[in-house]
Image: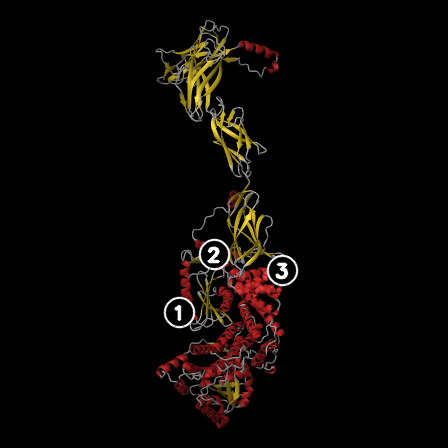
Amino acid sequence: MEAKPIVTSHGNQLVFSSLVKPLLEDLPKEPAEWKRSYGRPARNVHLEASFVPYDDDILPDDSVKTLVSRLYFHVYWTDCDLEGYKNTVKEEITEWQNALKNKNIPDWMIVVVHSDENKMKTKLLPRSSVYDKIKSDFGGKQPERIVVLELHREDRKGGELWQGFLSRLRQLLLQAFTRHLQKYEDNMRAQREKRNDIGWNFQNYFIVQEELGFMFEMLGLYDDALIQYDELDALFTQFVVNHASGRIRALEQEYNENLSLSESLDPVVAFQLAIDHTFDLEAVPWLRTLVEPCKSWAGLCLQKPISWEKRNLIKDNAVSLLELRNYLFTRQCALLLLVKRPAEIVQRAIDYLHETVQEMKVLEIAICEGGLDCWVYLSGLEVLLKCEAHTDPINPRSQALNTAYLWDYICRKLHKLGELCGLMPGADLDPTSTQLDRVVNLTAGMGLEPSTEELEEGEAPHRAPSDKLREALSSREAFQKIYLEQSELAMGTFKHIGRFRSARLIGKNLADFYMKLGEPQKAENFLLDAMTSYHKEGWTKLRDMACLELAQCQYQTGIHHKYVKTGCQVAGSSLLETRDRLEHMNNVMQLARSSNAGTMLLKASPLLKIDVSRISQSKVGVDEAFQITVTIDNQGPCDLTCDSIWLTLVESVSEFSDRRIHKLKSPVIRQASNSSLDNRHVMNLTNVNLNKQTPTEISLRALFEGTLEEPVLAGISCMNSHELLKRNDSSGGILKPTDDTVKKDVTSQQAAVTGVVLKQGENTVTLNFEGVLAGCYSPGQVGVKVGLLEFLKDTNSGLSVMVTCDETRCEIIPETLVAGIGQEVTVCIYSGNVAIDPNSKVKVTGSENLSITTSSHDNTVLLGGVARGGQAEWKMRVFHQPMVTGGLKVDDKIVFDCSWLPRPLIMTLTFVNPFKVTHRLYTARDMKYIQVTVHAQGGGQFQLSDWSLVATNGNDLELVCLNKPLVPMKIVSMQSCSFVWQLKCNTPELPPLDLTFTSAYMSPLEVPAEERQLRYSFKMADFQTLLTVKADICPSGDNKVCKTGVVSSFKLHVTQMSAVKPLADQEIMYRLEGGPNWKVHGKSSGVFHLSGGSYSHSVQVIPLTAGFLPLPAVSLLKYNPQIMKEEDERLSSTDDESSDTDSQPLMSEFGCGQVYYSGQGKQVHVYPVEVTGEVEVTIM
Amino acid sequence: MAGNYYFVIVGHHDNPIFEMEYFPPNKAPDTKKEDHRHLNQFVAHEALDLVDEMMWTTPNMYLKIVDKFNEWFVSAFVTAGRMRLIMLHDVKNEDGIKNFFQEMYETYIKHAMNPFYEINQPITSTAFEKKAQTCGKRHLTG
């Protein structure tokens, strides 16, 4: 808007015209600071002015309430000399001043121009120039209003004067503005205060405040101008809201109750109220025009910053709501562009369109159907076109968002218009005449475009929105083209900024459109996309709606395998209407029965909910049958006839290995005890973890303020918090896409039923399994076949069935037996998976030591028939020979030769050996005793009786039993019992004896009790006593006491038994061993001959310890030097082997009992030595 | 201030967990209510993006009007636990909605305290429903 403050010029116009050019140029060059009232911030203003010649008539009155066209300032120019001044100028100025004073105008200025050099020079007296004269005449209290200029001077002084003039002018101008504005604003405020008075007129006020806006705009204070418009906007909005919500109605009510009002009203209105008891709209006359039925819905026009036409209409109270709004917004846009905030336009446009539509509704303004949509479309498009060029450098994303939103908004409006005017594709009929009529009406209401001439030059005339809309409304094709184009644009922008939900919604609308257009293949993806996103986020209703549309779409596309899936989903949805569900169900069934399509595999859910509920047995034999019950919940809208239903069995690993695998997979993890620690409950955490591209590291930095001694603040700050907290766009759902492919299980064993009708709701189907191979199975896949469709469901019921294949086996009870007694055992034959025919035979055979007695004489058992899995048993007796010298247990085998089996069954039996018998010889000089010991090793209690020891070859031998005769002995496990016999004989030399110990034994375990014989044979030879050895210690000390460390003599005396033949030729060796107690002093061994029947020898020994000590051990050995000599000779001939042979003389021991050591057990008392002084004991 | 309102609580997985509609007392719900309702859902669902964006820009829980769709306004309230309370309304009623949200928030907290209620699961409690109904009557349609 090209308005400038107007200044009048009076006086010498020649002077003025010579100065006006530099003046206009120089005035705005420097800013002037404008201090404003009401504490508003000071502004720097670049002032401009336009000059008009002065005339008395154009001087404004105080009553004139204008701002822009007001004459703000008055300048009088003169270059007269003194003469001229006195003659004419003074008078003129006086007149001028009076005129100004009459109008109460204090804003004036007199400029005295000294153009003549000469005159200046002639100026001799002070206070005699024209300037001085004027100053004294008119200056009065305001000498600064008189300015002198010296144009002829090119020097500094001239320039200074000029600048001084300019700044003075600016200052005074601003003063004038301030004065006027203050007055104006006061007036305006007063008007605004009256806004609740009946009869107040918004339009008038609008013009007033707008004037202020103009003023600010004129001064270049666009921000302030914008504020004026925003205030007006808010005020108007408030009015509409108040009107709608009924302040007026409240007044009406008050009047009707009291028949008087607390506030004074416009007489006309009061009259009406009295007559009609209602205000109607007359109460707010200014609203009357606004709410008149709307005939024109011309859109916003942003081509020009201001439309004077509209402004005049507003002035005349003849504007419609839409026009008023349009005008207001146009002005706001213009100012926003001036303050370089174009991005705000789109944002405001959204609110503006939205609120205006709301206002139209609230005020119940009649408008032709579609008119408002037209208006929104036109206005929105105009804004979009205008803002295309302006991008927001600060926040492009938010601008993009707003733009997208606006595109979306106008698209929806276009869509609605298309519906109204019958332009949507798909309808078979051409638009009806009503619709055509409507098009004409709407087109007419759009109003005329501002003709191109009106446009400012240089601006390329772009295609106006109304042209576009007209084109769109002209034909279906054009409409489609434009609608699709704009929808894609909106969707693209939404996608670009990551607003996928919005994009999907548009996509869904587009899909609708494509469907109507008959291009379902284009619609499919949009619908699929929308459906998946709704599904992921759990908006089931929306998902099912989208699903329904998708089903329709896919049905039209004719892609059967996709359709059946969606169709089933629709049919299974409980949220949709039964009609739709039935329709799709029928379609699906039709497809299923049609011949041309191939087999289609589908997931059973959501149409059929399948679960394995029961397995009849948990364990069956191989050729047994078992049943599995399957529950099928038919969610469809009708009954479903199935060709077949089958169930596969999957061989599962056994429970044990399953558990092990499980163990391997998940080690024991500590469970948080508090469920609130669960991820899902923590804000945003799931999203962060699952979807978002989180930064690879979180960089933290320590924060520290203040000194170490006095910290002000310490903490940790995250450097990349913006990345971490980045909002998660709706692009990705929480759920990962699952693998949708369905695979039919064909490998496993299966069972099926055919021709089942699945009723709506829950059905139970029982499947019979037969002839399943051995193994452990769990139910695998359930399939329902309907025509070509197969609904599959992989079950995971946790149930399982064990199919076993048992062979015939045998068992003997008890497993552990005792040898030596006859015991009865029970033999069980388990038939397993074979039935045993009657008259089958089992031949039982034992081993050599094991005798078996069955009921039949040849140990063949005849079995009656045994069913599968049954068992047969019989009893038999077994007896195993006890092994008197053997170990603890004996294993033996029994062979069962079954007539119906190819191989005999072999069973192992374990017997406990009850006894172990040992013998021992005891000697006392020449008397001999034999001890036989029976050790019980287990097998319970035994009773021994009638024992005897018999020598088979001892003729003149007498064995005298030393035990109590005839008293039976009882032994139990781990006990032993001994029997001793004295051996008496007269012959000095006995031949080797064969002895046999026998005893009868009985066990209470054996029923019936039977006495059995225990037999133990052993040999004895060379046991008669030949030599008697006596040993003694003779202390050498005075008092015949042995002392440690003192040498004693050890006396050895060997005597030959008289009854035995002399051993004269036998060399005998003795050997002495001191052990730990004695030290043998001298030779510890020696060889001697028993030439005289006896031999004595003494050896020196030293006791090492004190106490009662056993004597040193002495032993006699046979010494055979002859053998050694022979050996030597043999060796000498073969020298080379001499080293290998030991040179030790060959010695042989006497037989057990041949030597009787009588000194054994003898002890000698050794006293410790009393230590007096130093004693050195040397032991060599 | 009577208008139509549609209220929904949205859980952490963007899933609706509670829905309710409010009509002015004198106006019976439209016959095409069902259709209407799913449209409301569409709008509320779409607004989630805006809510997610807006909640970072203000420390307040009540986000005021976050979106407009045709003639509908969308107001939102985000709880401390990031449950989103979303309201579709066709008349402006800032304070009423604010109070409504505040009260519903408290009701929700009480409900969430129930150890048998699992967060993010649809709310089926009749007591909660009744409370929502009276709350709506008090602040919105009443």
Q: Nearer the viewer, mark 1 or mark 2?
A: 1
**Residue drawn at the location 61% of the way across and 83% of the way down:** A453
Looking at the rendered structure, the secondary structure element under dot 1 is helix
Q: What residue would you read off at disc 1? A: B138
Q: Residues within 10 Å of mark 3 (few under 14, many from 20)?
A: few
- Image vertical order of residue A1167 relative to residue A505, above or below: above
- Disc number for residue A472: none
The picture quadrant where one finds residue A1055 is: top left
On the image, the x and y values in percent for residue B48 come to: 50, 65
Q: Residues within 10 Å of mark 2 (few under 14, many from 20)?
A: some
Q: Distance of mark 3 from mark 1, alpha carbons?
A: 59 Å
On the image, the x and y values in percent for residue A511 come to: 58, 67
Which callout, 3 or 2, points at the residue further toward the start of the chain? Answer: 3
Q: Depth check: B122 or A1079 in front?
A: B122
Q: Is there any visible trace of residue A127 in the rendered image?
A: no
Q: Nearer the viewer, mark 3 or mark 2?
A: 3
Q: What residue would you read off at disc 3? A: A594
Asked whether the residues under marks 3 and 1 belong to the same chain, the reply is no
* Circles 3 and 2 in contact, beta carbons < 8 Å: no
- Image vertical order of residue A394 relative to residue A856, above or below: below
State which quarter of the image contains the N terminus of chain A: bottom right
- Image vertical order of residue A1154 relative to residue A553, above or below: above
Q: Please, what is the three-letter code of the amino acid marked with disc 2?
A: Arg
Q: What residue would you read off at disc 2? A: A680
State which quarter of the image contains the C terminus of chain A: top left
The picture quadrant where one finds residue A1143 is: top right
Asked whether the residues under marks 3 and 2 belong to the same chain, the reply is yes
On the image, the x and y values in percent for residue A551 come to: 58, 63
Q: Is there any visible trace of residue A808 in the rendered image?
A: yes
